[in-house]
Amino acid sequence: MGQLRKVLVFDDSYVQQFVFQKDEIVKNSFEIFIRTPEYLAEMADIDSLLSVSEKRFLTILKSGKS
């Protein structure tokens, strides 16, 4: 067997603080993995569609039509 030439050391406090979380594997995992520019664009599109639907619904309610 060859000699050990390299050793990596983990900062245990970092690992405990950021990696092993109660409710998620990585602290702020949503911000890291999900909240991308594409996600934000899709959410803006959804918000816009919901806003249009809400305005139409309110218009119908005000006019007394069903």
Image (cartoon, rainbow, N blue to C red):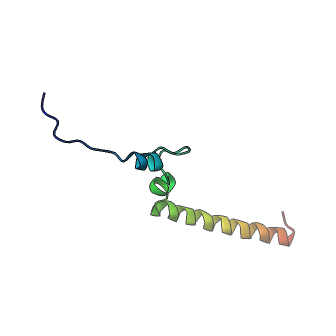
Which image quadrant: the C terminus? bottom right
- Could you tell me which residue is drawn at 56 percent across and 66 percent down? 44
Q: Residue reaching furthest left?
A: 2
- Could you tell me which residue is drawn at 16 percent across and 40 percent down? 5
Residue 9, quarter of picture: top left
Front-most of residues 63 and 48: 48
Q: Residue reaching furthest top?
A: 1
Which image quadrant: the N terminus? top left
Q: Residue reaching furthest right?
A: 64
Looking at the image, residue 4 sits to the left or right of residue 41; the answer is left
Instruction: Give residue 36's position: percent from left, percent from top.
Output: 46, 60
Q: From the viewer's perspective, is residue 28 above or below residue 16?
A: below
Instruction: Give residue 8's position: percent from left, percent from top.
Output: 26, 44
Instruction: Give residue 26's position: percent from left, percent from top.
Output: 47, 48
Looking at the image, residue 50 sits to the left or right of residue 57; the answer is left
Instruction: Give residue 24's position: percent from left, percent from top.
Output: 52, 45
Looking at the image, residue 18 sits to the left or right of residue 43; the answer is left
Residue 54, quarter of picture: bottom right
Front-most of residues 65 and 18: 18
Looking at the image, residue 18 sits to the left or right of residue 46; the answer is left
State the count of labels: 0
- Could you tell me which residue is drawn at 51 percent across and 54 percent down? 30
Front-most of residues 48 and 15: 15
